[in-house]
Image (cartoon, rainbow, N blue to C red):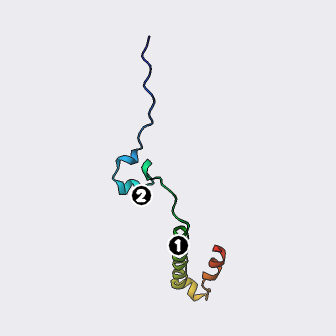
Amino acid sequence: MSPSPAPHTPPRNILSRLPTWISHWLGYRPPSAFSSPPPPHAIYLWSFIGAFCGLSVLQAIFGQIGHFIDRGVPPILASYATAVN
């Protein structure tokens, strides 16, 4: 009679062996890190900050590139702002 096989354990994620800050940046979260989701007001705040920064970068680009300035292209901030809503 052969001995029963050992129970299969899944291999550890290779990212868990890296330093914490690198593995976190690459998307690894330890099993104990999964807790309750962030509160809605935090999600709204970070969404606003992300949208504001993205539109600010677009406005800065269109306001500084000579190709657009020479042709009198209006800033595209208004068109992108309405598309976001």
**Can I make out residue 4 in this image?**
yes
- With respect to residue 57, does 27 lie above or below? above
Amino acid of disc 2: Trp
Which image quarter: residue 77? bottom right
**Can I make out residue 76 in this image?**
no
Which image quarter: residue 9? top left
The residue lying at 63 percent from left, 73 percent from top is: 84
Q: Residue 47 or 78: which is nearer the viewer? A: 47
Other residues around mark 1 within 10 Å, as few (<14) / some (14–19) / many (≥20): few
Other residues around mark 2 within 10 Å, as few (<14) / some (14–19) / many (≥20): few
- With respect to residue 36, does 77 lie above or below? below
- With respect to residue 10, does 7 lie above or below? above
Q: Is residue 17 left or right of residue 28?
A: left
The residue lying at 41 percent from left, 41 percent from top is: 12
Amino acid of disc 1: Leu
The number of callouts visible is 2
Q: Residue 69 or 26: which is nearer the viewer? A: 26
Which image quarter: residue 67? bottom right
Instruction: Give the label on residue 45, or none.
Output: 1
In the rendered image, residue 42, in percent from the top left (x then y), is placed at 51, 69
Query: Do callouts 1 and 2 mark residues in contact (Cβ within 8 Å)?
Result: no
Residue at mark 2 = 25
